[in-house]
Image (cartoon, grey):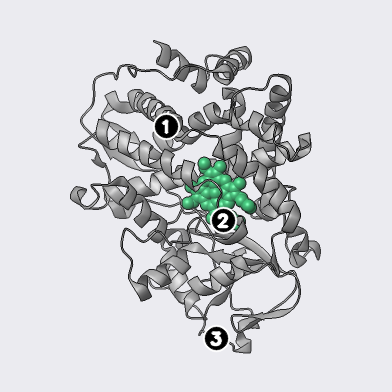
Amino acid sequence: MDIHFAPVPPPGCPAHDSGVRVPLHGPDFAANPHAYYDYARTYGPTAPVELAPGVDATLVTDYTAALNLLRDPAFRKDARRWRDLHSGKVPADSPVVPLLAYRPNCMFADGAEHRRLRQAVTDSMARIDSRRLAQITEHVSTYLIAQFGTRGSADLMADYTKQLPLLVFNELFGCPAQVGDRVLFGIAGMFDGVNAAESAQLLHGAVGELVALKREQPGDDVTSWLMEHEADLTDEEMVHQLSLLLGAGAEPLRNLIGNTLHRILTHDRGAYQDVRNAMNDTLWRNPPLANFAAHYPESDRIFAGQQVRAGQLMLVSFAAANAGMAQSEGHHAANRASLAWSAGPHACPSQGPATGITVTAVDNLLGQLPDINLAVPAHLLTWRPGPFHRALNTLPVAFSAIQAVGRPTAPVPPHHATAQAQRSAEEHRPGGPGRWSQFLAWLRG
Ligand code: HEM
């Protein structure tokens, strides 16, 4: 694709302020983001971009500059510093505002407050047993494959990657089905920028119900572990931490699984004997969070040769920084230094569980459907628009239909949270069993 922009000012040139901005939205960007990143890199380590109509930002596209920003406490995460939002320049109803606007959770906290909130998250996530997580993921995966496997075809985004993280999270967070459905709906809406404000509200309300449920009946789950942590989180803090964990977890996880499957299905099958290598290449070349890590300089300063102003929105392009690094240094599968998980104090605290879920989900699918292939030519696949994520719309596949898959031989013992989640789902179902109750019924035969 040819992209025609105005002539590019050299790095350091005042024309950086000339109003020529690289658009990170719209169908052309979604179709070929690397053409836009290549162009943005011609500005130097940072480029002026537009995230949505009326929403300007500075995008860090250089790997070293990105690390410098992510590790420098003079760049703050607290979005109440966002000058353009508070001056009214950014439309309050812009589709990107719900993801960027301040909320009292660890992603928007700095310094001691960040350490307190983050410690509660990392300590609670650390209590997840990796073998149990693999077992849950495998059972969920097998269940989902059983739902579409007899058809011989599927859309892996709708039938597999969208469902899997939430069914796994339902178990991990002790989250009832009817809450979980609204959580994913809310998160997808926020990331798509479709009815973003309502989506954020939907998510908030569903998580509030979960917190109330766990205050009454704690279980052996991440929600209850967060609650009993010495950080002593209030109900409001609980709701915001959980919304963050579920939101920051489900959507990129879904897309990491989708993008890893896309990578495998668009390469020779022999190229990826080890799913971890496919996932790592995906993290380098097609990271599910392409541009994020919003930061705000605490004062006017020079950054990477450019003047930046206090409260100016700055984003890191993990996708562009990785691509630039891979081009200049070359990259090999064993290199784990991609920026896809970010870096510094706000780097993703869930790399371990997210990696475990992804590898198990992809491994199990390929093991059960060994002749799976794309059902359409790769160039016809389309990607969801939006400046932050890198996510397929659909991933249509074909394979030899399988017989109805039996239950796993060693079912996950239903612990307290699961039994409670099932009860709750059954009590609240509108017109039939929800996805979570269906899964439990299948598991138990
Ligand atoms: C189990 C699934 C996941 C959970 C629960 C989770 C949770 C979180 C949380 C709580 C943060 C904020 C940390 C802080 O501010 O101190 C975070 C940040 C981040 N996560 Fe994850 N995450 C998950 C999966 C993923 C995946 C699959 C990716 C992509 C490869 C990813 C990429 C990131 C990035 C880039 C950040 C930094 C964002 C920023 O600074 O704005 N995460 N994650």
Q: Which mark is residue 347?
A: 2
Circle 1 packing at 10 Å, graded few (<14), some (14-19), many (20+), is few
Q: Position of residue 217 (x, y in %)?
A: 69, 19
Confirm whether residue 430 shows in the render: no
Q: Who comes first in sequence, dot 2 or dot 1?
A: 1
Which residue sits furthest right?
87
Circle 2 packing at 10 Å, graded few (<14), some (14-19), many (20+), is some
| Kind of residue sitting beneath label 2 | Ala
Of 105 and 73, nearer the camera is 73
| Kind of residue sitting beneath label 3 | Pro
Q: Which mark is residue 131?
A: 1
Q: Secondary structure at mark 3?
A: loop
Which residue sits furthest front?
230
Q: Secondary structure at mark 1?
A: helix
Mark 2, ligand 1, within 8 Å: the answer is yes
**Mark 3–mark 1 contact, CB under 8 Å?**
no
Of 380 and 137, nearer the camera is 137
Q: Who comes first in sequence, dot 3 or dot 1?
A: 3
Determine the residue positioned at 51% across, 21% down. Answer: 436
Determine the residue positioned at 61% across, 56% down. Answer: 346
Q: Position of residue 338 (x, y in %)?
A: 44, 61
Q: Position of residue 5 (x, y in %)?
A: 49, 78
Q: Which mark is residue 11?
A: 3
Residue 164 higher or lower than 66, as above or below: above
**Mark 2–mark 1 contact, CB under 8 Å?**
no
Q: CA distance from mark 3 to mark 2?
A: 28 Å
* Quadrant occupied by the C terminus: top left
| Kind of residue sitting beneath label 1 | Arg
Q: CA distance from mark 3 to mark 1?
A: 50 Å
Q: Secondary structure at mark 2?
A: loop
Q: CA distance from mark 2 to mark 1?
A: 24 Å
